[in-house]
Image: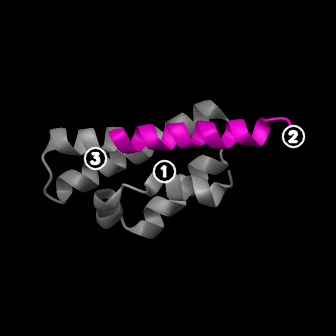
Amino acid sequence: MQIEEAVSAATAEAGALLSCLGQPVVAYHVTEIMRETDAEHARAMQLALMRRGIEALVDDGLENIEAEHFASQFHGRIGLTWELLHLSNNAPH
């Protein structure tokens, strides 16, 4: 898996967030998370993006609980994709 594929996979169902924050902003942050090789730092970056996402969704009119639910799903997709990316890159060939 390449970084571009990982970004596409992680953002595939993030239409509301892409609309609130803007596709270039979300793509930039997700790309930076995918490039990060340190798992702890990548998680911290994910949490920061999740908080920004919740704020943007609430500002856009979503109820807080709905925004948290959506952001949590997005956070999970990013984390899973990060793990798949870094496991595939570290696999012996």
Residue that carries the numbered disc 3 in the rendered image: 54
Q: Provide residue 67's location: percent of width, then percent of height.
A: 22, 45
Quadrant location of the C terminus in the rendered image: top right
Three-letter amino acid code at the position of disc 3: Ile
- Reading the chain from its start, which is encountered first: label 1 or label 3? 1
Q: Which residue is mark 1?
A: 10
- Among the two numbered marks 1 and 2 on one chain, the one whose residue lies closer to the N terminus: 1
Count neighbours of disc 1 (C-alpha within 10 A) and say few if under 14, some if 14 to 19, many if 20 or more.
many
Residue 35 location (% of width, % of height): 66, 50
Q: Nearer the viewer, residue 78 or 22?
A: 78
Looking at the image, which residue is at 27% across and 55% down?
Answer: 56
In this rendering, position of residue 71 left or right of residue 7: left
In the image, what residue occupies the spot 37% across and 55% down?
13
Q: Secondary structure at mark 2?
A: loop
Q: Is residue 48 above or below residue 61?
A: above
Q: Is residue 44 magenta?
A: no
Q: Is residue 52 left or right of residue 46?
A: left
Mark 1, mark 3: which one is toward the viewer? 1
Residue farthest to the front? 93
- Residue topped by disc 2: 93
The span picked out in magenta is 73-93
Q: Does the magenta stretch mainly form a helix, a strand or a loop?
A: helix
